[in-house]
Image: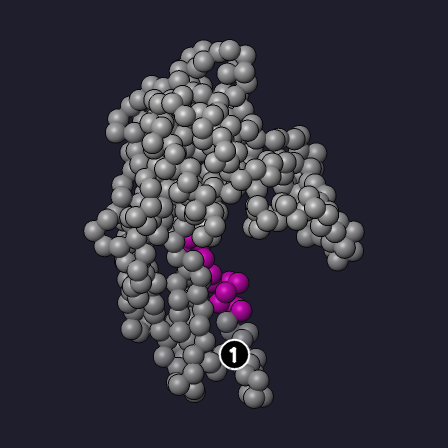
Amino acid sequence: MNLLRFRQAAPMVATLFLIPASFAQATGGDKVDLDALAQIKTEAFQHSQVMENLFWMSEVYGPRVTNSRNHKLAAEWAMKQMQEWGLKNVHLEKWPFGYGWQIKHFYAAMETPVYAAFTGFPLAWTPGTNGPITVEPVWAPIHSKADFAKYHGKLKGKALLMFDPAPLTLHTRADAQPSPTDEEILTRGDGRGGRGGGGRAENGAAAGAAENRDPSRRGRPGEGEWEYTPTSLALANAKNGVLRNEVNAFLKEEGVAISITPGYNGDGGTIFSTYGGSENPKDPIPPPIVAIGAEQYNRLVRLLQHGITPKLNFDIAVDYQKEDQNAFNVIGEIPGTTKPDEIVMLGGHFDSLAGRHRRDG
């Protein structure tokens, strides 16, 4: 085993390596090579290439939505690097997925009553606007399928704000906190803090309802227990995919020009959101959907509540990759010598989402 090769390869972000099991302490009582471990630690702490690899993955190739063109370009770079480092059997392991998608251009702003640029991004697997559009927003809270009839025929050509205003509270403590002690975790119990909030305590039926709607516990505290929320329409599991398809089919049928969400979490310029459409060619294609800052979304709702209808401008271009509907894993191997028939697997996410705009870039 060449430790230099190990040092170079191990920091690679989100690739799958196969390395000899001799570096793991086996349950059978294999002797640990402390000198080798010390050398590995020295290389990791003193000669790390993590930031250089992150630069190429995150800044040169940027967002890597599954099966998008960026995703494939990053994979080509990763395979070239792995081959230069001496890894063997470097290849792509393909598996069925669906359409790829990525952002090409995004502009969003309020033109009247005064100009204000929006911070935001289009949600994954949603279409573009086919050039600049100017639209008027309408606030039409759609909490469940029961609300479809209420807004039938009233949304054509509009920019739809279908969610309640995002609940935001004043930050009263620094976002970055030391890891809590065991005692603090036990004292806190089931409460949790959220970005933009001072935390909440959940118990009894309320906690059960929240867990059922948002098992990921990623949503904004206080967003509500409705069937359709920024969180429930953003999650990736099958149940939430059904909800997304219901809403998307309705929006398309009603002729909505564009739909706007405040994202499922974040404030102060940080926006968390994920899916809007689907990689599955058989699922309904929604109108364009964008996430903007929670404060900006809430401002639009307040303007409408005061009888002021703003003019909004959007210009969105996206790219659907439909030619090859197979996604892939990036595979490389470091052949072992002591136990060549055994493997240790290291891996992680190679793809990413296009959104989740953050203040730190």
Asked if residue 18 is positioned above or below residue 281 in the image, the reply reads below
- Whether residue 342 is visible: yes
Residue found 31% across the figure and 22% down from its top: 133
Q: Is residue 289 left or right of residue 358?
A: left
Please give the residue where the numbered disc 1 appears in the rendered image. 24
Q: Which residues are magenta?
A: 41-54
**Residue 360 x %, y %:** 50, 39
Q: Main secondary structure of the magenta part?
A: helix
Which quadrant, please, contains the N terminus?
A: bottom left
> Would you call the spot at circle 1 few (<14 residues within 10 Å), some (14-19), or many (20 or more)?
some
Q: What kind of residue is marked 1?
A: Ala
Residue at (45% x, 43% y) in the render: 243
Horizontal side, residue 92 vs residue 291: left or right = left
Residue in front for this viewpoint, 186 or 166: 166
Residue 293 forms part of the magenta stretch: no
Q: What residue is at 45 percent from the left and 76 percent from the top? A: 344
* Count of labels in the image: 1
Position of residue 339 in the picture relative to residue 97 (left or right): right
* Residue sticking out furthest to the left: 323
Where is 105 relative to 46, above or below?
Answer: above
Please indicate, yes or no, whether residue 60 appears anywhere in the rendered image: no
Residue 137: x %, y % from top left = 43, 20
Q: Nearer the viewer, residue 74 or 146?
A: 146
Query: What residue is rendered at 33% in x and 19% in y?
Result: 134
